[in-house]
Image (cartoon, rainbow, N blue to C red):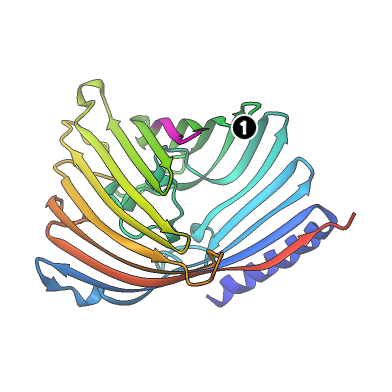
Amino acid sequence: MKRVFISVAAALISLSAAAQKASLLKLDVEARVDYTNVYQSGEKINDASGFKGRYLNIRLDGKLAENVSYSYRQRLNKPNKDATFFDATDWITIDYRLGNWTLSGGKQVVGIGGFEYDGAPIDLYFCSEYWNNIACYQYGASLAWDTDSRNDRLMFQFCESPFRRNDALNVRNNEMFAYNIMWAGSHGIYSSLYSLNFIEYLPGRFINYLALGNRFTAGDFRLALDFMNRSVSAKDFGKDFSVMCELKWFPISCLDVFAKATHDRNLADEEGDWCVTPGTSITRIGGGIEYYPIKDSKALRLHLNCCYTFGKAVTAAALQDRQTIIDAGITWKMNMLNLKRRP
C-alpha cells in the first residue's frame, strides 16, 4: 500500500505540472464504507458481514491541449492480494478529438451496452450475476463519431478480451481480444446504450453479445431496462441471457427511492460464457433509499437497501439461492483540486 501511495503521489505531481501549462486539471477523491449483513437460507454468514471499506478511488481529468484530454481513475483498495498497481487502475486514457471524431487509447471501459454495466461501481449496491463476473476494464483503442447535435455517439473498439485470464481453465493469454461496436443515444425522455460484441473466450473462439440498454426519464421517475443475449453459435440464441430492470423515484431533491430486479439464465448447449455459467437460472430482487443530507449537493450520500436472491446457481457463483443481503453505508465525494490556465 505504501508503494501505491508513492506512485499515486508521483503521478499527481507530474500531471499537476503539465496541467498548469495546459488547460485544466481536476482531481476528485471518493470513498464508500458499508455495514452489511449477509444471510444464507436464514443463517448469518459472519465472514461476509460487518463493516466493509467498499471503495477508495481517485480520479484525474484534464487537458494537454485544446483537443487532447486525459482521464484516470485508480482504486486504492486493490481487488485481491495478488493484484498489481495497474490491475487496480480502472482506466487511464488519452483522447484526441478532431471535429466529430475522437480517437482514444489506453486502459478503457470495454464497450458493452446496458445501464447496469455502465454505472460506476461506487454507486451500485446489488447487481446481476453477469455484472459480478465481467472484467470490464482492459487495454485497447477506440474510435468514436458524434453527430452534430451530440445526441448520438457510435464507437468502434479493439481491446484485450475480458477472458484472457481464466483461473478455472488456467488460461493466461494476452493475445485474446474483443471487437466492440456501441451506440449511445439521448433523445428527450429516452436514452440508449446498445452494443454488438465479439469476444474471444478461448484462443480463436468467440462468444457474441447483443446488449440493449434502455432508459426512460419522465418527471420524478427513471426506468432502466437492459437485455443482453450471449451466444457461441446461432442455435444457442435466446438460451443465455441477462435482464435488469430498475425504477427510481425522486420525490424530493435530497431523496431517491429505488426498486430493482435482475435475472441471469444460461441453458446453452455449448460452454463459452465465463460470466454466467451453464445451468444458471438466478433472480435477484430488492430496493432501497439514498439520502443526501447536504442541501443542493450530492457530495455526501447515505444509503440503505436490501435484496433477496433465489433460483439455481453453481457453487462458485456470486449470487446464491436463498441469499439475503441488508446493507447500509455512507459515500462521500471530494473535489481536491481544480486548476485552470490563466488567460
- Identified at 21% across, 52% down, the residue is 284
Q: Is residue 76 above or below residue 101?
A: below
Q: Position of residue 208 (x, y in %)?
A: 34, 29
The magenta segment: 188-198
The image quarter containing residue 212 is top left
206 relative to 96 in the view: left or right = left
The image quarter containing residue 98 is top right
Q: Nearer the viewer, residue 265 or 116?
A: 116
Q: Which amino acid lies under the numbered mark 1 shown in the image of this protein?
A: Arg
- Identified at 32% across, 53% down, the residue is 132
- Identified at 73% across, 60% down, the residue is 15
Q: Nearer the viewer, residue 162 or 257?
A: 257
Q: Main secondary structure of the magenta part?
A: strand
- Residue 11 visible? The answer is yes
Q: Position of residue 308 (x, y in %)?
A: 18, 59
Is-magenta flag for residue 196?
yes
Q: Position of residue 158 (x, y in %)?
A: 52, 34
Say which element carries label 1.
Answer: loop
Q: Residues within 10 Å of mark 1 (few under 14, many from 20)?
A: few
* Residue at mark 1: 150
- Residue 318 visible? The answer is no
Residue situated furthest right in the rendering: 343
Q: Position of residue 88 (x, y in %)?
A: 49, 60
Q: Nearer the viewer, residue 20 or 298?
A: 298
320 relative to 63 in the view: left or right = left
Is-magenta flag for residue 144?
no
